[in-house]
Amino acid sequence: MQIDSELRVAHWYELQLEGPLLKRHTHLKEKLDKAALRVLAFDIETTKQPLKFPDVKYDQVMMISYIVDGSGFLITNRQIVGQDVSDFEYAPREDYDVGTFTVFNEPDELNLLKRFFKHIRETKPTVFTTFNGDHFDWPFIQARAEHHKLKMEEEIGIFNND
């Protein structure tokens, strides 16, 4: 959405909203101070039927892994994950520093989503990044939140509006 609207990271804008939707934006070219960005990169894992794509009507989010400013986190849905997961160290390659992931083992999907939303409110990321997030991760999270009577827009101020 932001790329399609010509909104770019590290630029300042004046925004005009219509309810929760962006109506208009003006690039403030004269403002050159760099914004302090807090990036949250995330991925979700879901249940699914064999040889099928996940279906939001009955499949669940079983894990959310994410990094905020270099700190890693994993939230598990213990209704799906067989046992508690302990904090762990991880580096994607040998030339990366090893980081510790903090794990939150939640009893079910509702509490997994609440924990994720709570941590977003606490860390206040300014940039979200995920692979295929616009077409899978965000819509799936939003639909599963709605299944549990949570409104993602009210929880974190972000929602999928196609």
Image (cartoon, grey):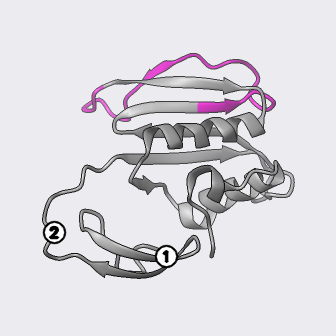
Kindly state the secondary structure of the residue where label 2 is placed.
loop
Q: For residue 97, what is the image quadrant?
A: top left
Can you say whether 10 is above or below 78 in the image? below
Residue 148 is situated, as x and y percent measured from the top left of the image, at 81, 48
Residue 110 against residue 131 in the figure, above or below: above
Question: Gap in Å between the C-alphas at discs 2 and 1?
Answer: 21 Å
Quadrant in the rendering for residue 3: bottom left
Residue under label 2, please give it: 31
Hey, what amino acid is under mark 2?
A: Lys
For the residue labelled by badge 1, is the local secondary structure a helix, a strand or a loop?
strand
* First in residue order: circle 2 vs circle 1: 1
The structure residue drawn at horizontal position 43% and vertical position 45%, both measured from the top left corner, is 124
- Judged from this view, the residue extending furthest toward the right is 58
Residue 103: x %, y % from top left: 56, 24
Q: Amino acid at mark 1?
A: Leu
The residue under the point 23% across, 55% down is 35
Q: Which residue does the numbered mark 1 point to in the structure image? A: 17
Left or right of 28 on screen, residue 105: right
Residue 122 in the image: above or below residue 1: above
First to last magenta residue range: 75-97
Q: Magenta stretch containing residue 81, yes or no? A: yes
- Viewer-side residue, 150 vs 19: 19
Classify mark 2: residues with Cα within 10 Å, few (<14), some (14-19) or many (20+): few
Instruction: Work out whether residue 100 can be spotted.
Output: yes
Decide whether residue 79 is among the magenta residues.
yes
Nearer to us in this view, 66 or 36: 36
